[in-house]
Image: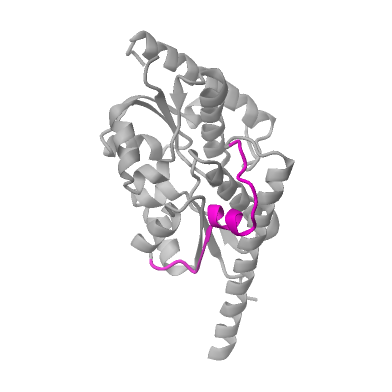
Amino acid sequence: MSSPLKIGVVSCSGEGYVEGTISRIATRLVLERLRPNNTVTICLPLFLTGEKGERMFAKYFPTIAVDGCEKRCAEKAIEKYSGKTAHSIVVADLLNVWDIEKPRSRRNLNEKEMKVASKIAEEIATAIDTLCMNGRRRKSANI
Amino acid sequence: MTDPIFIIPCSGIGKAYGTISREATYCVVEDLRKGETDTLCLSLLVSGDEETQRLVKSHRCIAIDGCPLECAKKNLEFSCAKLTANFRVIDLLKEHRKLKPKSITFLDKAGRELTKFLADKIALKVDELNRGETAS
C-alpha cells in the first residue's frame, strides 16, 4: 500500500497581526484535526533562513501557503526558493469575501473568532483534498 | 515615554516551544509591559520588508527562540537590528525539567507554566533595559 501524498501547509505565523494568528491556528487545526495523515508544516523563518530540509521538501512536495495579509510572506518565500505553490490562501481576502468582521485580539480568539479559524481550516482541507484527488488521477493515468 | 522595545518570537509552528515563545511575547506585550513593548512578524522581517527592517534597526529588540536553531536571534543579527537580549525556551526547559509541554496549538498546563516563567524573565529584562542596565 502506498503512503498518502504529503502536503506542506505553510503559515505566515505573523505575530504582529490578528490575521497571522488566524492563519496559524487554521494551519494547526488542519495538521492536528482535519487532515493529520496528509500534512506537514514548516517554520517559515527557518525556511527563509535557508534550512535545506525545509526547502527541499517545498521543492518536491506540493505546498499550500496560508498568509494572513496581502504581503503574502509565505507564498512569496516558497515561490522564491522552492517553486510555485500548489495553492494559496490569504486570510484577509477571505474575511472580505465572507464579509466577516476582523477579529480583535491577536493573542486569544473568542468562540466566534475560533469559528472563523475553523472555516479557514476547512478551506485549506478542501484544497488538500483537491490536490490529493489530482495526484491520484495523475498516478492512475500513468499506469 | 521611551520608544517601545520589540519582543520578537521565532514564529515556530511545528513544536510547543514556538507556541511558548509566542505566548510569552504576547503576555509581555499585552499585559506585563504593555506600552513599553511591542512585537512584529519575524517572517515579514526575513522577507525583507523595509518598514520592519527600519523598525528593528531603530529600536531595541529582544529575540525569543523556541529551539537551538535560533531563527529570531540570527535573523535579527542578519538585519543589523539593535539586539539587546535573547531567550531560548529550551534553556528554560533545563531549569524546569519536570515541565514537558506537549500540545502545540493550545498550550497544556506545563506549556502555560513555562510561558509564565519566560514572560516574567522577559519583563525583568525590559525593566533592566529601561533602567539603562546592559548586563544579561
| Residue furthest to the front | A99
Quarter of the image with the N terminus of chain B is: top left
x, y percent for residue B29: 51, 25
The answer to which quarter of the image holds residue B3 is top left
**Between B67 and B78, the one nearer to me in the picture:** B78
Horizontal placement of B130 versus B103: left or right? left
Residue found 49% across the figure and 53% down from its top: A42
Answer above or below: position of B54 versus A67: above
Residue at point 35% right, 49% down?
B47
Figure check: B14 above or below B115: below
Horizontal and vertical percent position of residue B75: 33, 40
Q: Is residue A95 magenta?
A: yes
Residue B107 picture location, percent across and down: 65, 36
A142 vs B117: above or below: below
Residue B82 lies within the magenta run: no
Residue B110 in sight from this viewpoint: yes
